[in-house]
Amino acid sequence: MFEIELKFQIPQEKQDALIKAFQRKNDRSLHLQAKYYDTPSFILSEHSISLRQRLENDQWVQTLKLPTEQKLKRAEFEHVLATDETELDLEVYLKNKQIDKSIQTLLEQNKSLLEIQFQTDIERRLSVFHFQNSQIEVSYDQGQIFTQDDRLTLHELEFELKQGTVQDLISFILPRVKRYGLWLDVRSKAQQGFQLAQSIQDNPVEFQTSLQLDAKDTAEIVLKKMFNNCLNHLLPNSTAIASGNFNSKHVHQARVAIRRLRSAIKTFSGWSLHIDPTWQTQLTELFRQLGSTRDLDVIREELLPQLEAVGAPKFKLPESETTDKQKLTKLFRSFNFNYLILSLIQFIEQDSTEKTKTSAHKLALKKISKLHQKIQLDAQNYLNLDIEARHKTRKNLKRLRYSLEFVSSLCDKKAVKKYLKSIKPAQESLGLYNDFIVAEEILTKLVKTEPQVWFALGWIAAEKQHVLQQSQQDLLDFAQISTLQ
């Protein structure tokens, strides 16, 4: 029912070598022609559902794919049709008790509106490898996705776990990723096809989603669910950047996802003996490389309009790395990034055996309480702290918020809502203060070549002092709030 597969894009210069490397005596070749169905308003795509009929050599197979809590896992329901091409048959899904009733209702309500939205024509070379104690199917797909008006060429490599462990799957994949420069792509053919059918150029920006935990989960399982939630946030954005089809919003959300992942590790890493200490180092470096890009984007998109409104002379900013797309694309195609992600997936998927007598809920509140107390101490003396210490206070405030959001489903909803509301003013004012500090540092370097920047620096200096006072007050207000019980 569930398929576990990892799909990678192949650099053009490595395609021939890769084909030769995966040729085996037991290779199979399949000519796959598929039709993907949806309503004119693309309601299935909106719910991350794909419905296709695929001709596999001379046999038609109908498949319904549904989303799961993990981007890399899909619930798959196959139904063999007649040899000749047939109409859609939804009854098999409407009667299947494994399919959620809300999905069945959606299919029932829209079955008369379903029509072909795009098609695929793929030549697949398929090999099966026995590695360690697992069976892994490797598929090399070449072909195209097409509509009446447009088409998209495909060269993809998929590794599917047919039997065994995800640990074996990733151990098998890693040397190939390094040798052939493969990079992880979480877009399905269905997603790419629906974008093509709707003439959508940009990949969708992925935002964080709430995490639903089970009170019976052990601390280690909760930690793995946190990691999974962060990867669900990060990977669609990292894929967009790696594909070269992205904007500043993808970069910003990738940074937020990385910051959330770093927060989970820093706050809760003691919940598992299997945390690799290099993950935090790698994530910090990745975040740093994205930082300068975001800093310039903030100045360009948020600060410059304010300066123009007060009549500031115009000046030229250096190009951000969002403009230099190749640099960011290379970063997310790199072996280091893909190795990090595959290592995290391996950790998430390995069996959890660690148990604690104390519930994850109580352990989490203890961590959150300690962070709360640190911020209370900083609030009393905030104006006397140096810039670096103020920055640390801001980071702790963000970590406090993310840590609580991770476990909020285990807590009283009203209490969480009230607590998060009390954090918001301080987080916003401290964030604005940090933006002014960063902008001041960047613009000061431009003075020699752009003397008109002096006006902007004077305005920033005045605004910065006002925001600093507001930050102190917002922190003091937050310090009066009791920590969660």
Image (spheres, helix red, strand yellow):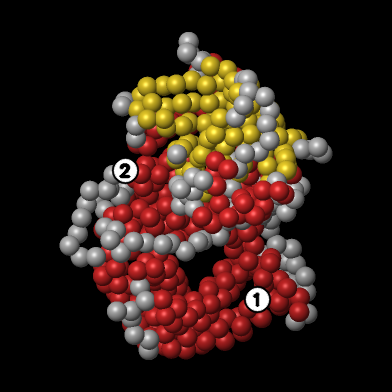
Residue 366 image offset from top left, x and y in percent: 27, 72
| Front disc: 2 or 1 | 2
Picture quadrant of residue 378: bottom left
Look at the image and tell me in which quarter the N terminus lies: top left
User: Which numbered tag is attached to residue 457?
Assistant: 1
Asked if 157 appears above or below 112 in the picture, the reply is above
**Which residue is at a point 71% across and 71% down the rendered structure image?**
304
Q: Secondary structure at mark 1?
A: helix
Q: Can you see residue 164?
A: yes
Asked if 120 appears above or below 214 in the picture, the reply is above
Q: 417 or 263: which is nearer to us?
A: 417
Could you tell me the amino acid type at mark 1? Leu
Picture quadrant of residue 389: bottom left
Neighbour class for label 2 at 10 Å: few (<14), some, many (≥20)? few
**Which residue is at a point 31% across and 54% down the rendered structure image?**
221
**Which residue is at a point 51% across and 46% down the rendered structure image?**
95
Asked if 421 appears above or below 360 in the picture, the reply is below
Could you tell me the amino acid type at mark 2? Gln
Calculate the distance from the C-alpha at mark 2 to the C-alpha at mark 1: 52 Å
User: Which numbered tag is attached to residue 350?
Assistant: 2
Q: Is residue 69 left or right of residue 9?
A: left
Q: Residue furthest left?
A: 357
